[in-house]
Image: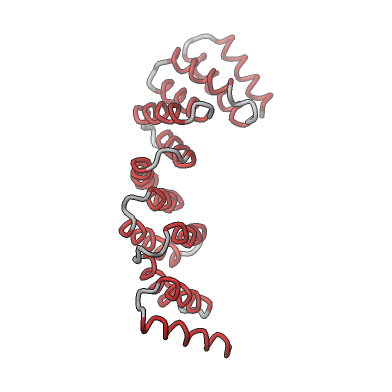
Amino acid sequence: NNQKGRALEVYKKVLEKFPDEPYALLALADYHYQNGDRDKAIDHTLKAFKNKQLEIDLKVKILYQYVQFADAKRKEADDAFKLADALIQTHPEEAKGYALTGDLYYVFDKDSMALVFYDKSLEFRKDVYSVWQQELFLNSDLNRFDTLLKRANEAIEIFPNQSLPYFFKGVALQNLVKYTEAITAFNKALKISSENKILQSQILSGMGDVFHLMNQNTQSDSCYEEAIRKN
């Protein structure tokens, strides 16, 4: 306890001379967090987040810890949204802040808001596959099939060897009643998904649905049977 008390005095002295020193602010935030004073902890963390001199990767690491626990504790959720907002305000042209804010909304099943931030993240950086995955899943879940088709085609341009964008292209085309094109997309997805048996089963099931809609029941039954074998 004496050691902690001395550390606290050191942090305070540093901040008296340099009130915006981000590492001292984070150290003080950690001290308060460990001692159960969440309000002081988040206040100091927020102040550190608003300092552009503190590297964004460290901010993302800190915010990610809040995101992980946000669904379990309401207070952590409120704090996470405050930190996410500060991160974006301080680094408005960094894709990471928008992506992590999207993750935060996703945790709370606010899919439409999550998509707004994933879209924004992709405006600044298009080579992060995990963001594209979220884009595709959420547009599909929200039945936005025109957008899903557009996003799937964009993802295919950037990640031509990933099977998931082709799968979602097939899903979009199926729901847009473009059955022949849907089968082509599903076949491409199947061809490059050899390591993922679960996805293969989903692709084959999707193909079965499309063949059924086309009244091609022999092909449909064959796809369903193969999907069951893959499971």
Residue extending furthest toward the right: 229
Question: How many callouts does the rendering have?
Answer: 0
State the residue at coordinates (61%, 20%).
224
As displayed, is residue 118 above or below residue 7? above
Q: Is residue 39 visible?
A: yes
Seen in the image, is 2 located left or right of residue 38? right
Q: Position of residue 46 (x, y in %)?
A: 37, 68
Seen in the image, is 44 located left or right of residue 73? left
State the residue at coordinates (65%, 25%).
228
Q: Nearer the viewer, residue 231 or 158?
A: 158
Q: Position of residue 37 (x, y in %)?
A: 46, 79
Scheme by which the image is coloured: secondary structure
Seen in the image, is 214 located left or right of residue 20? right
Q: Position of residue 87 (x, y in %)?
A: 36, 59
Q: Quadrant of residue 131?
A: top left
The quadrant of the image that shows the C terminus is: top right
Residue extending furthest toward the bottom: 2
The quadrant of the image that shows the N terminus is: bottom right
State the residue at coordinates (45%, 60%).
63
As displayed, is residue 64 above or below residue 157? below
Q: Nearer the viewer, residue 171 or 191?
A: 191
Q: Is residue 71 visible?
A: no
Q: Position of residue 123 (x, y in %)?
A: 33, 41
Q: Nearer the viewer, residue 5 or 73?
A: 5
Q: Quadrant of residue 48?
A: bottom left
